Image (cartoon, rainbow, N blue to C red):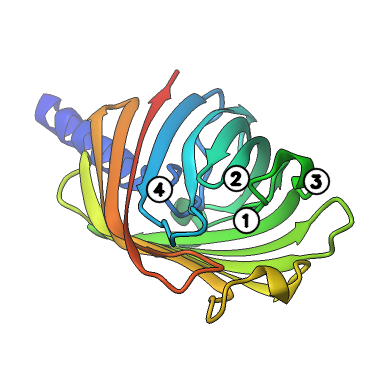
Amino acid sequence: MRPLALLAALVLAAGTARAEGLDRDSLLTDAPAVPAQGTVRVTGGATGASTDTGATNTGSSGVSGSIGWTPIQNLSGDVGAYTQIGAAGGVSARVRYQFLSQSSAGIDLSGGARLKSVSWHASSSPATNTSGEMEFLVAAGRRFGKFELVLNGVFGVETGGTGGRDIEAKGFAGYRFSEAVRAGLDSRIQTEISDSEKSAQKPPNARDYDLTAGPAVSWMVARNVQLQALLGVTQPKKTDITTPVGVVSASFDF
């Protein structure tokens, strides 16, 4: 009986391990599941990109940090702060609810909202940074053995009476070499559907979308400690350049 009990325990542990993993955000893509009830997660990250066009210096977030909590099953929230290259920093708050899980429905599916005090492409002048942003998110994902796929759809509305609106698509496709090490392609593209800014403020031939993509790796150093890194390319909005970008982050669960 003892060998059978040991085998059953191993199978149960393996099943639990396979069910985990999609509750962690990648560097660009929101997770389709939320952490287990009671989890407190602290995350910090940094982005570096050379996007100097000679006249302006724009880019993605420079540094960021957040603390999240799952007070009840399937419901998670977090608050954070961030700075942006070429723009002032701000604070953010996000809430997510997981509607479906792969263990019972074959797919992880969640919806949520994020409020940012300073929109992603705000002006570098604090006096004119009156525009925040409210985002509405749908995230879906599934693991196929060692492969996993996560997709996001985001609709954003600028606050402060500016009337700007944008949509985002995010995606991560990866392969798990083990339960601790994962690698894949992470990407995010954003485009305006209603631009509140005057076209005269944009350089000639400037694009109306923002793209970041590249290979990424994740390492679970311990069960509650994750390190992530991405090295790819970015095409910042309001420019006509393509430049390398690097993103790193670390998260700790309590």
Mark 2 residue element: strand
Q: Which numbered circle lies on residue 218?
A: none
Question: In this view of the protein, can residue 89 be seen by the observer?
Answer: yes
Mark 2 and mark 4 lie on one chain; the one further toward the N terminus is 4
Mark 3 residue element: loop
Q: Residue at x 70, y 55 (%)?
A: 135
For residue 157, what is the image quadrant?
Answer: bottom right
Mark 3 and mark 1 lie on one chain; the one further toward the N terminus is 1
**Residue picked out by circle 1:** 121
Mark 1 residue element: loop
Q: Residue at x 84, y 64 (%)?
A: 163
At label 2, which amino acid type do we have? Answer: Ala
Q: Look at the numbered discs 3 and 1 and tell me whether their residues touch, using CB distance below 8 Å.
A: no
**Residue picked out by circle 4:** 27
Q: Is residue 251 above or below residue 156?
A: above
Q: Look at the numbered discs 2 and 1 and tell me whether their residues touch, using CB distance below 8 Å.
A: yes
Q: Which numbered circle lies on residue 130?
A: 3
Outermost residue, front direction?
A: 55
The CA span between labels 2 and 1 is 8 Å
Is 32 on the left or on the right of 52, as rendered? right
Mark 3 and mark 4 lie on one chain; the one further toward the N terminus is 4
Mark 4 and mark 1 lie on one chain; the one further toward the N terminus is 4
Mark 3 and mark 2 lie on one chain; the one further toward the N terminus is 2
Is 116 in front, or is 49?
Answer: 49
At label 4, which amino acid type do we have? Answer: Leu
At label 1, which amino acid type do we have? Answer: His
| Residue count near mark 1 (Cα–Cα under 10 Å), binned few <14, some 14–19, many ≥20 | many
Q: Residue at x 29, y 50 (%)?
A: 230
Is 157 on the left or on the right of 89, as rendered? right
At label 3, which amino acid type do we have? Answer: Thr
**Residue picked out by circle 2:** 87
